[in-house]
Image: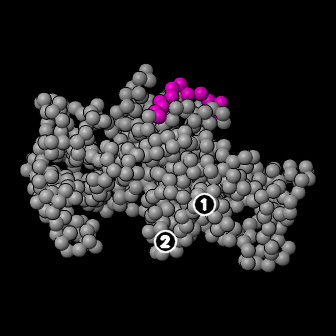
Amino acid sequence: MKNDISIVLSGEAGQGIRTVELLIIRALKNSGYNIFSTTELMSRVRGGNNTTEIRVSNKSIQSFVDKIDILIVLSRNAIYRIENRLSENTIIIGENTFIEDKYKDGQYKIKDIPLSSLAKEVGGLIYSNVIIFGLLSGIFNINLNLIKEYISEQFSAKGVNITENNINAVIKGYDYGKNLKLAIQVEKNEEIKKQIILSGTESVAIGALAGGCNFISAYPMSPSTGVIQFLAKHSEEFGVVVEQAEDEISAINMIQGAWYAGARAMTTTSGGGFALMQEGISNAAMVESPIVIHLAQRPAPSTGLPTKTEQADLNLALYTGHGEFPRIIFAPGNVEDGIFLTQKAFNLADKYQIPVIVLTDQFFIDSYQSIKPIDFSMFKPKNYFIKTDKDYIRYKITEDGISPRGVPMYGKGYVRFDSHEHDEGGFITEDPEIREKMVDKRLRKMESISKESIDAEIIGSKNYKTLIVGWGSTYGVIKEAVEVLKDDDIAFVYFKQVYPLPNNTQKILEKAKNRIIVENNATSQFGQLIKSQTGLEFNKHILKYNGMPFSLEEIIEKLKEKK
């Protein structure tokens, strides 16, 4: 096993797989390994079967792979759902009673570990996950003192006895891992030790803080909930008011009130919650209130697959709200862009007084990767509201459509707004001529917004004949596939802004003789948007909508079919 190893932990919800993941990816990174991890969950509080994939590599990686080099079995019935990903080279590690007889016929390498008895020796089955952490640490020859330090940090709040039991558990697992003598040959890099590990959730939350967010209101809905949880955890440190609303309608209205008062606010939700917000979004468009919404996609309609992934809410974000009004939609594909785009969403929402949507998905949100430290000095929150005078006019008609925005008690002016159509002063009107002028004023913002669009990024050959189009969370897998193929005729164009389309879209796409689009949905929603805006067709659509992200292997296979 050399330079790129895929480890999969498979067990039941409630067994602490996430704890193992967070401990081992930190230990691996601090030992100089590139890491990437992602989870695949069933919608269960307890039971079912969950898996976590941890990739360890000698290069930067951000994609899911089908192959399993090491499978850690933590419960019965932990293999059947991933059986098709096993190969003759897969090493299955687990308690003998957890591994069904059909996998013991010699086609796989089986390593028995008496997990239950080892856990009981140190205090009970609750210590099983820490033993597995020790096992993996031993396999990768991670410094044992470093491992003990992590355990002490993790469990010190639970008392000396619990901490000592966990240290004993990790040592038992470590010894077993070392004794397995697996041939791990992944090159280390000292520079990686200086990197940080972030999830997609953390990147959006940190980006919000970088954008000056000081108010968040949301109703819990997977997979978006982690953003408000992160901001709640750090609310005192960064001065953020956190409100768990009674529903999504309240949440969207609360953040409008916060912006009206001069705060910088956001909400976070998933598709079903976003649907409830539509009237509020439309209201924000009419009163020209800035709002920032994080929309974390999951498979629908209705409850759908609440713990799986999909990119099927682009049209929902694009066409939500009654009436015609401008908006911006960002779709980060890596955690650096999660930070950058979310902070930018606040400045653009403030500047243009519009809804800005940060569109992610479960795969992006629940994945972890190591990145170079971020220089936050480059992020400057900018307030665009003005100090009003006594003659202040809230909806003054301007050449670029942007009226001066005041906030109550900052100046001498009266800050009026209404959800009905209104004149420049904010007074209700049904005058046809004024109506047209106000609609035109609001829509004129799009010209200025388009000038600030973030260019699509070309990765790979600049002399491409085949161009692969991807957006959002497909970034990592397409990028890695292009790197593996090493074909001078192929390039990848990554869209991190999906609406309005970047200014370089037409030029980039027209250059290609063969255009392929990759999307985690059934109808190629972004492909339809590009066609409607540019008139350009795609030669091939690579689509997936079974709740799982694209794997590196399947993208490579599909791209090889291009000829």
Q: Which residue is mark 1?
A: 251
- Image x and y of residue 474, in percent: 45, 41
Q: Quadrant of the N terminus?
A: top left
Quadrant of residue 5 within the rendered picture: top left
Q: CA distance from mark 2 to mark 1?
A: 17 Å
| Amino acid type, residue under disc 2 in the picture | Ser
- Magenta run includes residue 542: yes
User: Does residue 206 appear anywhere in the picture?
Assistant: no
Q: Residue furthest left?
A: 179
Dot 2 or dot 1: first in sequence order is: 2
Q: Quadrant of the C terminus?
A: top left
The residue lying at 66 percent from left, 46 percent from top is 320
Seen from the viewer's position, the closer of residues 87 and 546 is 546
Mark 2 residue element: helix
In the figure, 36 relative to 559: above or below?
Answer: below
In the figure, 265 relative to 178: above or below?
Answer: below
Mark 1 residue element: helix
**Depth-wise, is mark 2 or mark 1 nearer the camera?**
1
Dot 2 crowding, Cα within 10 Å, few <14, some 14–19, many 20+? some
User: Does residue 271 appear anywhere in the picture?
Assistant: yes
Seen from the viewer's position, the closer of residues 525 and 277 is 277
Mark identifier at residue 235: 2
- Magenta run includes residue 137: no
Region rendered in magenta: 534-545
